[in-house]
Image (cartoon, helix red, strand yellow):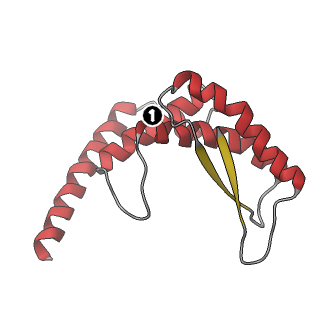
Amino acid sequence: MITPLYLYTRDSRHFSSAARDNVEAVGAEVEPQVREHLPLLAEQLELACQTGSMVIPEIARQELGYTLFHELHHLARGWVIHRDETRTTFMEGVVSEGLATVFEHEVGGRRTPWGEYPDNVRGWVEELLALSIRLKRILTRFERCR
């Protein structure tokens, strides 16, 4: 069960009853679809919701559903960042984001420009792998200097 937690901002924005109903309806709609494919997802989930000056309710409703597909995939796989702790390598992050994006597309039905393979996908993969190696070298040098 997804339990929304409504957070308040310093500027005292609050969720209207309609906005709360919207969040709960989206959670109730998306959760069974996600659980059908990710049965190991924790039974109890908390969804932190915060208002913002740039939130448009109609867009928020649509985007929240897709965001839940994406983020619940991360939770089911255990790929989460607690505060600012990095628990994975750069390439693990790339792969995890890719998997969540594919899940969001294949199960949630969302097509995004960043979720499409470029024509030169092989070159893209080689670039990411090279970047991963460079980052590893930089971090190793940084650790030696500490």
Find residue 56 and report its horizontal and vertical position in percent: 81, 55
Task: Give the answer, above or below, for where 112 lies relative to 53.
Answer: above
Instruction: Count residues near mark 1 (Cα–Cα under 10 Å), then give few for <14, some for 14-19, many for 20+.
Output: some
Residue at 36% across / 62% down in the picture?
85
Task: Give the answer, above or below, for where 99 lies relative to 84.
Answer: above
Give the left or right position of residue 75, taking residue 144 as reference.
Answer: right
Find residue 87 and report its horizontal and vertical position in percent: 32, 53
Give the left or right position of residue 56, taking residue 140 as reference.
Answer: right
Give the left or right position of residue 48, taking residue 117 as reference.
Answer: right
Find residue 118 and report its horizontal and vertical position in percent: 47, 33
Q: Is residue 45 visible?
A: yes
Helix, strand or loop status at disc 1:
helix
Q: Residue furthest left?
A: 144
* Residue identified by numbered label 1: 99
Q: Quadrant of the N terminus?
A: top right
Residue at 72% across / 77% down in the picture?
10
Q: What's under tag 1, amino acid-wise?
A: Leu
Residue 144 vs residue 18, the one in the foreground = 18
Find residue 107 and report its horizontal and vertical position in percent: 60, 25
Q: Quadrant of the C terminus?
A: bottom left
